[in-house]
Amino acid sequence: MEKQIPKHDLLIDGNWVPTEQGDYSTIINPATEEPIAYVAAGTEKDVDAATKAAKAALKTWNGITAAERGRILNRLADLMEAHQEEIIRLESLNGGKPVSAVRRQDMPAAIDTMRYYAGWTDKIMGQVIPARTDALTYTVREPVGVVGAIVPWNFPLMIGIWKIAPALACGCTLVVKPAEITPLSIIRIGELALEAGVPPGVLNIVTGKGRIVGDAMVAHPLIDKITFTGSPGVGRGIMEGAASNFKKITLELGGKSANIIFNDADLESAVRGAASGIFFNAGQVCSAGSRILAQRSVYYDVIDRLIERAKKIRIGDTASEDTIMGPLVSQRQFDAVMDYIEVGKREGAALAYGGERVGDKGFYIQPTLFTQVKNEMRISQEEIFGPVACVIPFDTEEEAVAIANGTAFSLAAGVWSRNGTRTNRVAQALKAGTVWVNTYGYTDIRLPWGGTGQSGFGREHGEAAIENFTEPKTIWVNLQER
Ligand code: NAD
């Protein structure tokens, strides 16, 4: 019997509705290239309807106590936990991430994020500021209003929740646009949100193309803030578009992060960290350690160990618990990464391992290592967003820092050494939003996350997100009799 392919509509004002044009796009499993769902292709009119619903729902969402909002978000976290196995499978099927990786990272992080911000709802406070003797002066923090959340395809669930949870906690309402090719987990979250008691209109989901749905959100006068994670090119367009009504924006963009291995590092753990830093999620990670800097005396040792590790990475069926690395997310991403591999060869870097497609179904590429890379090469300057590492030698600490800082990005970096003075000195000198010392790649919702320069601006997570989704209001109460 032929398998029934599910069809998903838009979530607008608490109802699942078809787009006004009735179009759907086909969602595929990148591991098999087979269709797994049809998802509504939203239009400008759909964005308008969702935004108006979100605007109207601000009153309802802020008409209940902060504690009650927290209880609703905790119920949503409970439901995510209760349905986690199903969501893990869905995320893996849609994004090509091995189930084991989603189970270890994305899913627990998403639940943790929802609970963390559920706890914030009744702790978002203003201040009494003693400015005058003739007035009582204080601030309150108000929600910014309607938030447009634009989510990328590399961590559809986790990054989606990084935006949804704090915005809801602050009393904002949302129009969420998942990436066109990976909407399934956030659609499921939309269903669970209704079940948890999130009132109609508070969380709206408009699936569809960036150029249509995303553009319409950026241009919409009733959207007060855009929180965006994605590529620098689209980020620039959003910044320009947001000028139309002076929208507040946060941009989390790309990276070209350096992982610096000194000769006094524990090489085994440094190489383990460096390999997972670039090969985790097939390198489709904004903070991927795509430039591995190794001190010259251990350079060849590091390369040999990296090759050994690359060889052992189990690539394959994303539904299998043993798989370590899945495919790239799409044909487009596969082509872009293969192009960069050709660029690397043309630029004169040495292809030490990988560089080939794996199998003939699914968008799999071997873990790939380029050595003899010069930092000015394109493969060392541009975000490849695939399992491709550049290994670069250095002699001194100063040189390592100069190479690490020598890109337009500044999202993250790693440093490996047994010398604590050195790791602290280098951590201070690195231009990065996050520096990992003797580890790599961890994020925690309690710690600020973001970058500067071509990596964007603003911070997500922790209290920073509360500031993103609220505005302080000053209240000045005259105390003098007139
Ligand atoms: P992308 O910029 O192509 O897409 C991101 C989102 O923007 C998608 O939902 C897409 O549909 C939407 N979009 C596309 N065109 C748009 C437009 N004109 N207006 C509004 N929205 C539009 O990026 P991607 O390929 O999905 O994601 C990969 C990029 O994201 C990489 O550069 C990566 O480094 C970055 N990223 C950054 C972080 C971070 O925290 N800094 C995290 C994950 C990914």
Image (cartoon, grey):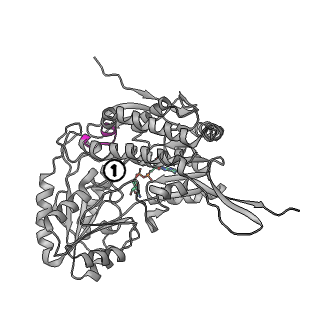
Identity of the amino acid at label 1? Gln
Residue 323 vertical position relative to residue 414 in the rendered view, above or below: above
At horizontal 48% and vertical 29% (from top left) the residue drawn is: 195
Q: Secondary structure at mark 1?
A: helix
Is residue 24 or residue 402 the one in the foreground?
402
At horizontal 24% and vertical 75% (from top left) the residue drawn is: 420
Q: Quadrant of residue 44?
A: top right
Is residue 259 or residue 194 the one in the foreground?
194
Q: Residues within 10 Å of mark 1 (few under 14, many from 20)?
A: some
Q: Quadrant of residue 309?
A: bottom left
At horizontal 28% and vertical 55% (from top left) the residue drawn is: 283
Please give the residue where the numbered disc 1 appears in the rendered image.
333
Residue 25 vertical position relative to residue 295 in the rendered view, above or below: above
Query: Is residue 150 visible to the viewer in this orientation of the structure?
Result: no
Left or right placement of residue 203 versus residue 291 in this view:
right
Could you tell me which quadrant the N terminus lies in? top left
The residue sitting at the right extreme is: 482
Could you tell me which quadrant the C terminus lies in? bottom right
Disc 1 beta carbon < 8 A from ligand 1?
A: yes
Is residue 446 or residue 200 the one in the foreground?
446
Where does residue 435 sit, x and y in percent of width and height?
A: 33, 67
Query: Is residue 127 visible to the viewer in this orientation of the structure?
Result: yes
Q: Magenta region: which residues?
A: 91-99
Is residue 480 or residue 238 the one in the foreground?
480
Task: Reply yes or no: does residue 270 show up in magenta.
Answer: no
Where does residue 288 sit, x and y in percent of width and height?
A: 31, 59
Where does residue 17 sit, x and y in percent of width and height?
A: 54, 28
Residue 156 vertical position relative to residue 86 in the rendered view, above or below: below
Left or right placement of residue 187 versus residue 333 in this view:
right
